[in-house]
Image: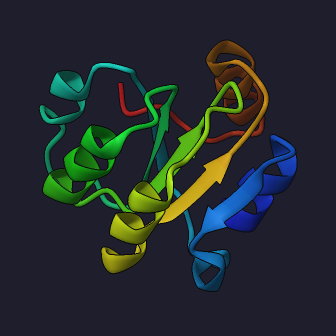
Amino acid sequence: MTIEEIKNLVNGEVICGNDYLDHTIDHVFASDLMSDVLTLKDINNLLLLTGLSNLQSIRTCEMSDINYMLIVRGKEVTEEMKELAEENDMVIIRTQYSMYKTAGILYNAGLPAVY
């Protein structure tokens, strides 16, 4: 499933990474605990679904080689977060939906979870 398809499914807004909307996502991992994200190993084309909107979440993605993030509940993305994400060629999408609803939409659309 492409980033653009995901954005459309969740009525998302692309915060950064418009040039990568044709990239394909193979798995989704939903977490607000960045320590759980850091346990993921060698998973390519992963979308992180989170309600944690801060620099720590961007840094965690950077360390985990995750280039795609979907922020739920309409959380704000600061300019500093956006700049760091752009430096790392990341995509950030924001949706107004809850994590539960967003995960359900993506699951029903056929996007598999990591576990």
Quarter of image, res 5: bottom right
Q: Residue 4: image x %, image y %?
A: 75, 66
> What quarter of the picture does the C terminus occupy?
top left
Quarter of image, res 18: bottom right
Q: Is residue 45 left or right of residue 34?
A: right
Q: Residue 47: image x %, image y %?
A: 47, 48
Residue at 77% from the left image edge and 55% from the top image edge: 13
Q: Is residue 37 left or right of residue 77?
A: left
> What's the colour scheme?
rainbow
Foreground pick, 23 / 108: 23
Q: Residue 89: image x %, image y %?
A: 39, 77
> What quarter of the picture does the N terminus occupy?
bottom right
Name of the residue lying farthest toward the top: 100
Q: Residue 102: image x %, image y %?
A: 71, 27
Residue at 62% from the left image edge and 41% from the top image edge: 111
The relative height of residue 7 versus residue 82 in the rendered view (above or below) is above
| Residue 82 visible, this orientation | yes
The relative height of residue 98 versus residue 108 in the rendered view (above or below) is above
| Residue 2 visible, this orientation | no
